[in-house]
Image (cartoon, rainbow, N blue to C red):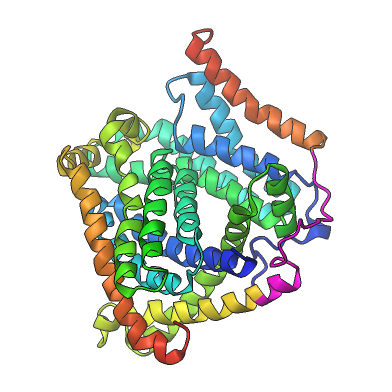
Amino acid sequence: MTGTALFSADIEHRGMVLDPRTKLAVILTLVIFVLGGTGGDIRAVRIAASVLSLLPAVLMLIAGQWKKAVVYGAVFGGMLTLQKLALPELKDAALSIAGMCVMVFVRLMPGLAMGAYTLSNTTVSEFIAAMHRMHVPQQITIPLSVMFRFFPTVLEEFSAINTAMKMRDIRIGGRHAGKLLEYRLIPLMVCSVNIGSELSAAALTRGLGVGVRRTNICQIGFHLQDFAVLLLTASVYVLWILGIAGVIA
Amino acid sequence: MKGKDLINIGIFSAIYFVIVFLIAMLGFIPIFLPLLAVLVPILGGIPFMLFLTRVKKFGMIWIMSIIMGLLMMLTGMSWQPLVVSVITGLLAELVYKSGNYQSAGKAVLTSGVFSLWIGGNYLPLFFAAEKYWSTRQNFGQDYIETVTKLMPAWMCPALFAAAFVCGIIGGLLGKALLKKHFEKAGIA
């Protein structure tokens, strides 16, 4: 696995720790207000959502991922400026292309960045403990945690298979272009199934198959930093409600 | 359902979602937006059929469907896909259950019913078009007009039908590939 492996946080070097539930609340809020554009007609909500979009950069900075934080902050800030200054000037095809870039970076990226931060900063145990506290049944939490843990593996295997197939000229425009999909999907599935059986064996040794209530040594809970982040998150909702009620324009 | 089954759900959901996500990126080109209902079920059918060979207990297909709905909600497709995926997932589960979790014909049909969840992603386009576009103004008027032209109201049931039919095609394709590759490798 690479250094940025998901769901395998380096517990000793990750700085300030937030409760997984706090991170989840931030992701949901970003999806509703930034990606979903709820309350976009209220100016205060738009500003608060933009501020919230910068939160992932701050959190990454605290967690010592300063390179990612700077890149994210710069791209987000740049795109936001582009949206404010350049978009009204463009039209037709240029508008479509620029609009899509802005859409991807200003709308989609904050949620993805927060998701990436959450996954790189939460251990599987903490995630399961938090889900357990929220009374989510283990029929949902186990597949979900396996899935998030598995995404990078799938992508890594896929790029390796892709390289191997390109070498055999099985690519777009190559001699065997017809086998393009079959010769990628099938090996991907075979190796995924094998990795899956290994994961299952590992999970069985952790007592996943016993069917009794599992214990968890993770200390999760809300601290001062959680309240600060939750306050910021809640403020977006409050502004939105105030805006709907007509208190602020 | 035991730990092993739950892990299998997670693994196949991951493969399936990666395929969905890669194809969905094509949706930025207007003509591909309705075509997603064709491409996703056909390509997704391949891992889904392999997943079905692992399904022996009630609830596995349903959970996978619910997870797809949750992921769609988290990636900004609003709540409609989740509602649809909860219902179609249960239907798919019942179809496969009626074949005692081993009938090959029922498996292909299950793949078709399961694929209906993809239709749910289009619902906001038809029933909340104004809100849908108000959050996508950045795409430019050209994109909006092209998609609106591509998506008259009758397209809504047509997309569900396309997802179903292509799910069956994907199921058949998956079955053929299972036979060709996986049975002799001993993992189907």
The location of residue A52, given as percent across then percent down, is: 60, 34
For this rendering, which residue is in front, B79 or A22?
B79
For this rendering, which residue is in front, A175 or A245?
A245
Above or below, A231 against A247 in this view is: below
The location of residue A173, given as percent across then percent down, is: 25, 80
For this rendering, which residue is in front, B39 or B82?
B82
Q: Is residue B167 magenta?
A: no
Residue at screen point 56% across, 35% down: A29
The location of residue B138, given as percent across then percent down, is: 34, 37
Q: Is residue A171 visible?
A: no
Q: Quadrant of the N terminus of chain A?
A: bottom right
Q: Main secondary structure of the magenta part?
A: loop
Residue at screen point 34% across, 29% down: B131
Q: Magenta region: which residues? A: A201-221
Q: Is residue A136 visible?
A: yes
Q: Is residue B52 left or right of residue A112?
A: left
Residue at screen point 32% across, 87% down: A169
Above or below, A85 against A111 in this view is: above
The location of residue A30, given as percent across then percent down, is: 55, 37
